[in-house]
Amino acid sequence: MPQLRPIRSLLPSRSAGLSDTDAGHAAPRRPVEPTPAEETVVNSAVYRDGRKTATPATLSEALGSLPDSSSMAWIGMYRPNDAQLYAAAKQFDLHELAVEDAIVAHQRPKLERYGKTLFVVLRAARYCDETERVEFGELHVFCGPTFVLTVRHSESPDLSAVRRRMESNPDLLRLGPEAVLYAILDAVVDGYAPVVAGLQNDIDEIETEVFSGAPGVSRRIYELTREVIEFQRATRPLLGMLRGLSDGFEKYNTDEELQRYLRDVTDHATVVVERADGFRQLLGNILTVNATLVSQEQNEEMRNLTQASYAQNEEIKKVSAWAAILFAPTLIGTVYGMNFDHMPELHWAGGYPFALSLMMLTCAGLYTIFKRRGWL
């Protein structure tokens, strides 16, 4: 059991902006100025044999009110700052590296053991129907022999529901801090189910848009792919974490009931990870199909443009051919229409028929040439 450091402080009432999630019911016992750690504590309870025995006002009181090793304290903190988290770390004798990870936040899910204390990082996810986006939250869990300290950096997951569930099942709660840890894991994994359903619905809509030629679908595919990748980052490490817990069953004498509970969580997590992997592969295929359809549409447009250009060229050739045919007699007529006294064949009786014949022969020759070349 960690050494206790006395703190003469109280749990303050929650501020107006604080969520009801993981809300506590403890009431202050005496008007003493709170310490930084208690300012972010939203629930504090002591359990013995699966039953709540106290709602202590301070962290030191929570640890000091543990009657024996079969009891445990469950403390919930919400968005603590550096000083508040360090204050709590002193009370629970937490390892400084784990505390630094909890302060930095934005960690990938992981499981680490510092002596007898487990440090777990979880990424909760929530699907927003209004924006069709996935919101991610972060939860840190410190699980010791006689305590569970949860540090939430977001509204999700709803730990108050986990607490109510555990309090309604004393047989499970009396198994200690590990039972609480597995219940939190189960709540986080179960919270992925609506996200999977939401992503599946988005993918179905995208498939319809792709084959209907909707504009902007490529951007939506890209954005959804990014969300799926982020979802994979939140879920894939869970399998390694759960395997790590399973490997320690024999070493740490984990209760058989908890082993079954963990295997059930592992099964659910495996399904989620497989679905996420399938979504990413499917989106890649959809993007390829969309690129193919866009390319085909562009090729069709180019073909139509080429055909239109070809038809235009044919018309231009016809116009040019007739213009050349008409230009020849016009040139001859223009030459013989000039009024000069000393022009050849000007007074020749056959000059007029000769000019007309020359015009007709020139036109016929040009027509024959253009017709052979396919211009007419």
Image (cartoon, helix red, strand yellow):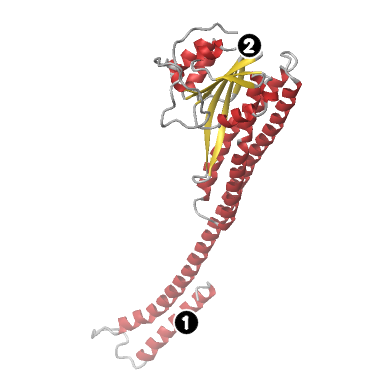
At horizontal 66% and vertical 36% (from top left) the residue drawn is 272
Query: Where 315 falls versus 117 (above or below)?
Result: below
**Side (left or right) of 115 relative to 91:** right
* Residue nearest the viewer, comparing 314 with 45: 45
SS at badge 2: loop
Q: Which mark is residue 88?
A: none
Say if 223 sits above or below 369 in the image: above
For residue 339, what is the image quadrant?
bottom left
**Residue on which the image places disc 1:** 364
Question: Residue lying farthest front?
Answer: 29
Give the residue pinned by disc 2: 116
Residue at horizontal 63 percent and vertical 11 percent from the top: 116
Q: Position of residue 134 (x, y in %)?
A: 53, 39
In the displayed structure image, the side of residue 278 where residue 30 appears, left or right = left
Q: Give the vertical position of 200 relative to 192 (above or below).
A: below
Q: Residues within 10 Å of mark 1 (few under 14, many from 20)?
A: few
Q: Can residue 79 be seen here? A: yes
User: Which is nearer the eye, 72 or 249?
Assistant: 72
Task: Residue type at mark 1: give it.
Answer: Ala
Badge 2 amino acid: Lys
Q: Quadrant of the N terminus?
A: top right
Q: CA distance from mark 1 to mark 2?
A: 108 Å
Figure check: 235 above or below 356? above
List x then y, in percent, for residue 123. 56, 29
